[in-house]
Image (spheres, rainbow, N blue to C red):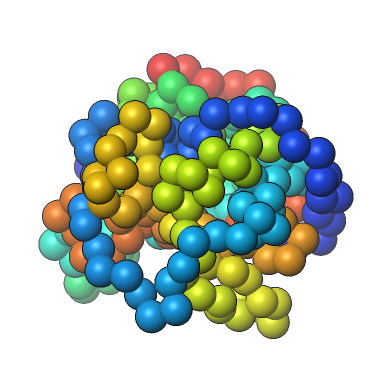
Amino acid sequence: MARRTRTDRGAPRRTFWLRTAVAVVVCAAAVGGVAAYRTVSAEPGERAVTGDEAARLALSRLNLYQASPVTVALTAAEGGGVQVRVEGIVDYRTHRGAGRYLVTGANGPLDHGLIVWDAGGLGLAPAAQGAPAPDAAGPPWEQAERVPRTGWSPRTYTADPLDAGLQLMVQLGADRPDNPLLLAQSGARRLGRDRIDGRDHDRFVGPRAQGAAPDAGRSPLTYWVDGDATLRRVTMRMPGLGTPTTVDFTGRDAGAKLPEAPWLTG
């Protein structure tokens, strides 16, 4: 990249283990530790979460972990009319992802290729000049296995929207639920309900970061969670950008197997 460029589900588990609410802490780390909070007027119908809603929100990250590997799609606005789209797979047991990326501008496509990412950073394998997008060459995780290490351009994460979105995405799944009481006490709120792919999802704003004052403003993260505590979508507001970064989870891909290499992305 020139610059940086459903379907099985995990069965819900109604077992609550004590755990610090970390979702927004992850986001703060993803944007380079810079606070991304701002005061936002309450939406019509906005209210505090109920006990059941807090429980579903708390379970959603565990269910995502249990469902992995899951198919994902990330859309990030980079500013200046440039948008990056990543479609691929994330395995929350290994905290690895692989996919294909497409960068578009006001006048059309700018760049495309393969992308891999993990907890430490990402690697890009841009397509050759004039080469078609790698849609028909098999799943991106299979293609990534065939790219030699010399074909990747690895780097650590930066604070730009693509990097922040990838870093957030790879850390959203967790091997145990969050503490619903802490989520409720830390500012998680229900904003409304939306229908996605024919299924109802409650829309929640996430809790404030640990240690934040009660008047620190709303979390930059919004979650869409259905009645089975399945996480369908997450958006993240970025400072200075009107369009949030969006991550969609579209189901389990039981046949996906992320490659052991090339994870020289740290």
Which quadrant of the structure image shows residue 36? top left
Q: What residue appears at the point 34 percent right and 24 percent down from the top-left corner?
A: 156
The reply to whether residue 138 is visible in this rendering is no
Foreground pick, 156 / 152: 156
In percent of width and height, residue 76 lies at: 34, 56
Which quadrant of the structure image shows residue 7? bottom right
Foreground pick, 37 / 239: 37
Q: What residue appears at the point 23 percent right and 38 percent down from the top-left corner?
A: 35
Q: What residue appears at the point 49 percent right and 61 percent down from the top-left corner?
A: 48
In percent of width and height, residue 145 lies at: 63, 31
Q: Is residue 72 left or right of residue 121?
A: right
The reply to whether residue 49 is visible in this rendering is yes
Quadrant for the N terminus in the image: top left
Quadrant for the C terminus in the image: top left
Which quadrant of the structure image shows residue 180? top right
> Is 112 placed above or below 125 here?
below
How many labels sit on residues? 0
In percent of width and height, residue 236 lies at: 37, 53
